[in-house]
Amino acid sequence: MIKIICAVLLIFLDSLTKFFAVRYLKGKESINLYLIKLTYVENRGAAFGILQGQKFFFIIITFCVLIAIIYYYKKVDTLSKLSLIFIFSGTIGNFIGRLFFGYVVDFIELSFINFPVFNLADIFLTIGTIILGFVTLKN
C-alpha cells in the first residue's frame, strides 16, 4: 500500500508543478534561478523533442510500458520495485498531458549546459532507469 501511495504522490507532485508552470510561466519570459531557469515549453514529442506530433504512437507505447511494469513488479526485488515505481510515476505523469492536451508541459531548464527543457516526470523516469540499470549491472 505504501508503494501505491508513493506513486500517487509522485504523480500528484508532477501534475501540481505542471499546473503552476501553465499558470505562472505560459506566455512569459523565463525565470532565472541561477543554476536552472523556469521556462515554459509544450513538448509534442518524446525526449529531446523527437517524434513530434505522434500522440497515438505515444499512447500505445505508454500502455505497453505500463503493462510491462505491472507484470514485472511482483517478480522483482525491492530495489527494482522502487525503480519501477519511479518509472511508472514518470510515465503516468507525462501520459496525462499527452492524453488530455496533446503535449507534455516542460519547464525546467539547466542554465549551465545546453540541455532540453524537462519536467519532474522526466526526472522520475531518469531516477527509475538509473536504479534499474544499477540493479541489472549488480546482478
Image (cartoon, rainbow, N blue to C red):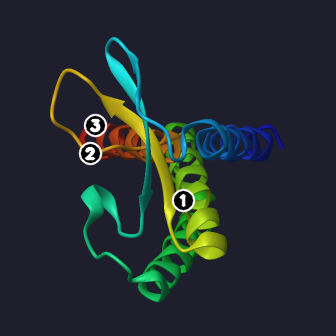
Q: Earlier in the sequence, mark 2 or mark 1?
A: 1
Q: Picture coordinates of residue 115 (x, y %)? A: 21, 39
Q: Which residue is mark 2?
A: 116
Q: Which residue is mark 3?
A: 138
Q: Name the residue rendered at 60%, 64% in the picture.
A: 97
Q: Is residue 87 left or right of residue 32?
A: right
- Classify the position of the C terminus by image quarter: top left
Q: Residue furthest top?
A: 34
User: Separation of disc 2 and disc 1 at Cα?
Assistant: 16 Å
Marks 2 & 1, CB-CB < 8 Å contact: no
Tag 1: amino acid: Asn
Q: Residue furthest right?
A: 1
Q: Secondary structure at mark 3?
A: helix
Front one among 62 and 112: 112
Front one among 69 and 25: 25
- Classify the position of the N terminus by image quarter: top right
Viewer-nearest of discs 2 and 3: 2
Tag 3: amino acid: Lys
Q: Which residue is mark 1?
A: 94
Q: Secondary structure at mark 1?
A: helix
Marks 2 & 3, CB-CB < 8 Å contact: no
Q: Name the residue rendered at 39%, 83% in the picture.
A: 54
User: Separation of disc 2 and disc 3 at Cα?
Assistant: 30 Å
Q: Name the residue rendered at 33%, 11% in the picture.
A: 34
Q: Is residue 94 left or right of residue 137?
A: right
Q: Earlier in the sequence, mark 1 or mark 3?
A: 1
Q: Secondary structure at mark 2?
A: loop
Q: Picture coordinates of residue 4 (x, y %)? A: 77, 47
